[in-house]
Image (spheres, helix red, strand yellow):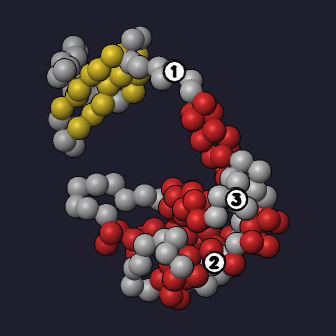
Amino acid sequence: MKVNFKYGIRTYSGSMDEMTYGSYRKNTICIGRKKVIPRITENNTLIGSKTKNLAAIYASISGNYKQELKQYAQLNIVNVPKGNMPPNGFALWVKMMFKFEKSDPEHIDLTTLTYTDLQTVGDSIISIASAVTNGFLEKVPGAETLTANM
Protein backbone atom coordinates (compact mmCIF):
# COMPACT_ATOMS: atom_id res chain seq x y z
CA MET A 1 0.00 0.00 0.00
CA LYS A 2 1.13 3.55 -0.68
CA VAL A 3 2.12 5.37 2.49
CA ASN A 4 1.85 9.07 3.37
CA PHE A 5 3.76 10.42 6.36
CA LYS A 6 3.11 13.49 8.49
CA TYR A 7 5.42 16.43 9.18
CA GLY A 8 6.88 16.70 5.68
CA ILE A 9 8.53 13.28 5.66
CA ARG A 10 8.35 12.10 2.04
CA THR A 11 9.72 8.57 2.25
CA TYR A 12 11.26 6.09 4.66
CA SER A 13 13.13 2.82 4.12
CA GLY A 14 13.31 0.25 6.87
CA SER A 15 11.14 -1.46 9.45
CA MET A 16 9.15 0.09 12.25
CA ASP A 17 6.68 -1.67 14.55
CA GLU A 18 4.87 -4.29 12.42
CA MET A 19 5.53 -2.62 9.05
CA THR A 20 8.35 -2.65 6.49
CA TYR A 21 8.73 0.43 4.28
CA GLY A 22 10.50 0.85 0.97
CA SER A 23 11.43 4.03 -0.88
CA TYR A 24 10.98 3.93 -4.66
CA ARG A 25 11.19 6.14 -7.76
CA LYS A 26 14.03 8.31 -6.52
CA ASN A 27 12.49 8.83 -3.07
CA THR A 28 9.13 10.07 -4.34
CA ILE A 29 6.98 7.06 -3.37
CA CYS A 30 6.92 5.05 -0.16
CA ILE A 31 5.30 1.62 -0.10
CA GLY A 32 4.55 -0.25 3.11
CA ARG A 33 3.77 -3.88 3.81
CA LYS A 34 3.25 -6.05 6.85
CA LYS A 35 6.57 -7.21 8.26
CA VAL A 36 7.02 -10.93 7.60
CA ILE A 37 9.39 -13.03 9.65
CA PRO A 38 10.22 -16.18 7.68
CA ARG A 39 9.84 -19.51 9.41
CA ILE A 40 13.04 -21.46 9.89
CA THR A 41 13.32 -24.44 7.56
CA GLU A 42 16.02 -27.01 6.97
CA ASN A 43 16.90 -25.33 3.67
CA ASN A 44 17.24 -21.89 5.33
CA THR A 45 19.60 -23.38 7.90
CA LEU A 46 21.67 -25.15 5.23
CA ILE A 47 22.05 -22.04 3.05
CA GLY A 48 22.87 -19.98 6.15
CA SER A 49 25.66 -22.34 7.19
CA LYS A 50 27.08 -22.42 3.65
CA THR A 51 27.03 -18.62 3.38
CA LYS A 52 28.61 -18.21 6.81
CA ASN A 53 31.43 -20.56 5.80
CA LEU A 54 31.88 -18.76 2.47
CA ALA A 55 32.20 -15.43 4.30
CA ALA A 56 34.99 -16.92 6.43
CA ILE A 57 36.78 -18.23 3.31
CA TYR A 58 36.35 -14.87 1.54
CA ALA A 59 38.20 -13.18 4.41
CA SER A 60 41.25 -15.36 3.60
CA ILE A 61 41.32 -14.60 -0.13
CA SER A 62 44.15 -12.44 -1.49
CA GLY A 63 43.66 -8.70 -1.83
CA ASN A 64 44.61 -8.80 -5.53
CA TYR A 65 41.87 -11.34 -6.23
CA LYS A 66 39.30 -9.23 -4.37
CA GLN A 67 40.37 -6.16 -6.36
CA GLU A 68 39.99 -8.04 -9.63
CA LEU A 69 36.60 -9.33 -8.44
CA LYS A 70 35.52 -5.69 -8.06
CA GLN A 71 36.78 -4.99 -11.58
CA TYR A 72 34.86 -8.01 -12.88
CA ALA A 73 31.70 -6.75 -11.15
CA GLN A 74 32.09 -3.47 -13.06
CA LEU A 75 32.65 -5.32 -16.34
CA ASN A 76 29.67 -7.57 -15.62
CA ILE A 77 27.26 -4.61 -15.82
CA VAL A 78 26.79 -5.54 -19.51
CA ASN A 79 24.99 -8.71 -18.33
CA VAL A 80 22.60 -6.89 -15.98
CA PRO A 81 19.22 -5.81 -17.37
CA LYS A 82 18.65 -2.06 -17.51
CA GLY A 83 17.01 -0.80 -14.35
CA ASN A 84 18.35 -3.65 -12.19
CA MET A 85 21.04 -3.13 -9.59
CA PRO A 86 24.29 -4.91 -10.55
CA PRO A 87 25.69 -7.43 -8.04
CA ASN A 88 28.89 -6.61 -6.18
CA GLY A 89 32.03 -8.73 -6.21
CA PHE A 90 31.14 -10.74 -3.11
CA ALA A 91 27.68 -11.62 -4.48
CA LEU A 92 29.21 -12.80 -7.76
CA TRP A 93 31.80 -14.84 -5.87
CA VAL A 94 29.12 -16.54 -3.75
CA LYS A 95 27.09 -17.33 -6.88
CA MET A 96 30.23 -18.78 -8.48
CA MET A 97 30.89 -20.93 -5.40
CA PHE A 98 27.35 -22.35 -5.45
CA LYS A 99 27.82 -23.24 -9.14
CA PHE A 100 31.17 -24.81 -8.23
CA GLU A 101 29.49 -26.98 -5.59
CA LYS A 102 26.73 -27.97 -8.02
CA SER A 103 29.33 -29.08 -10.59
CA ASP A 104 30.70 -31.79 -8.23
CA PRO A 105 28.41 -32.26 -5.19
CA GLU A 106 30.07 -35.53 -4.18
CA HIS A 107 33.42 -33.86 -3.50
CA ILE A 108 32.53 -30.22 -2.78
CA ASP A 109 30.47 -29.24 0.25
CA LEU A 110 30.31 -25.51 0.98
CA THR A 111 29.48 -26.10 4.66
CA THR A 112 32.86 -27.77 5.28
CA LEU A 113 35.04 -26.31 2.51
CA THR A 114 38.18 -24.46 3.63
CA TYR A 115 40.52 -22.02 1.92
CA THR A 116 43.18 -24.75 1.75
CA ASP A 117 40.69 -27.15 0.12
CA LEU A 118 39.89 -24.48 -2.45
CA GLN A 119 43.54 -24.18 -3.40
CA THR A 120 43.69 -27.97 -3.85
CA VAL A 121 40.44 -28.72 -5.75
CA GLY A 122 39.60 -25.27 -7.10
CA ASP A 123 41.80 -25.07 -10.20
CA SER A 124 38.78 -24.27 -12.38
CA ILE A 125 37.95 -21.20 -10.26
CA ILE A 126 41.37 -20.22 -8.90
CA SER A 127 41.28 -16.99 -10.94
CA ILE A 128 38.45 -14.99 -12.44
CA ALA A 129 39.73 -15.70 -15.96
CA SER A 130 39.64 -19.47 -15.33
CA ALA A 131 36.18 -19.23 -13.71
CA VAL A 132 34.86 -17.43 -16.80
CA THR A 133 36.55 -19.93 -19.14
CA ASN A 134 35.04 -22.87 -17.21
CA GLY A 135 31.54 -21.36 -17.10
CA PHE A 136 31.33 -20.49 -13.40
CA LEU A 137 31.12 -16.75 -14.14
CA GLU A 138 29.47 -15.04 -17.11
CA LYS A 139 31.62 -14.01 -20.05
CA VAL A 140 32.47 -10.32 -20.27
CA PRO A 141 34.98 -8.43 -22.44
CA GLY A 142 38.29 -8.10 -20.59
CA ALA A 143 37.76 -10.99 -18.15
CA GLU A 144 40.73 -12.87 -19.62
CA THR A 145 43.09 -10.27 -18.09
CA LEU A 146 41.88 -10.96 -14.52
CA THR A 147 44.41 -13.64 -13.58
CA ALA A 148 45.17 -13.05 -9.88
CA ASN A 149 44.90 -16.26 -7.84
CA MET A 150 42.74 -16.62 -4.77
**How far apart are the alpha carbons under marks 1 and 2?**
37 Å
Q: Secondary structure at mark 2?
A: helix
**How far apart are the alpha carbons under marks 3 and 2?**
16 Å
Q: Is residue 123 left or right of residue 97?
A: right
- Image coordinates of residue 66 in percent, x first then y, are 62, 68
Q: Secondary structure at mark 1?
A: loop
Instruction: Please give the label number shown on residue 124.
Output: 2
Looking at marks 3 and 2 on the same chain, the residue that comes earlier in the sequence is marked by 3
- Image coordinates of residue 64 in percent, x first then y, are 66, 75
Q: Is residue 145 left or right of residue 53?
A: left
Q: Amino acid at mark 1?
A: Arg
Vertical order, 38 against 24 (above or below)? above
Which part of the image, by quadrant, shows the C terminus? bottom right
Q: Amino acid at mark 2?
A: Ser
Looking at marks 3 and 1 on the same chain, the residue that comes earlier in the sequence is marked by 1
User: Which residue position is annotated with label 1?
Assistant: 39
User: Which residue position is annotated with label 3?
Assistant: 106
**How far apart are the alpha carbons under marks 3 and 1?**
29 Å
Q: Is residue 58 left or right of residue 41?
A: right
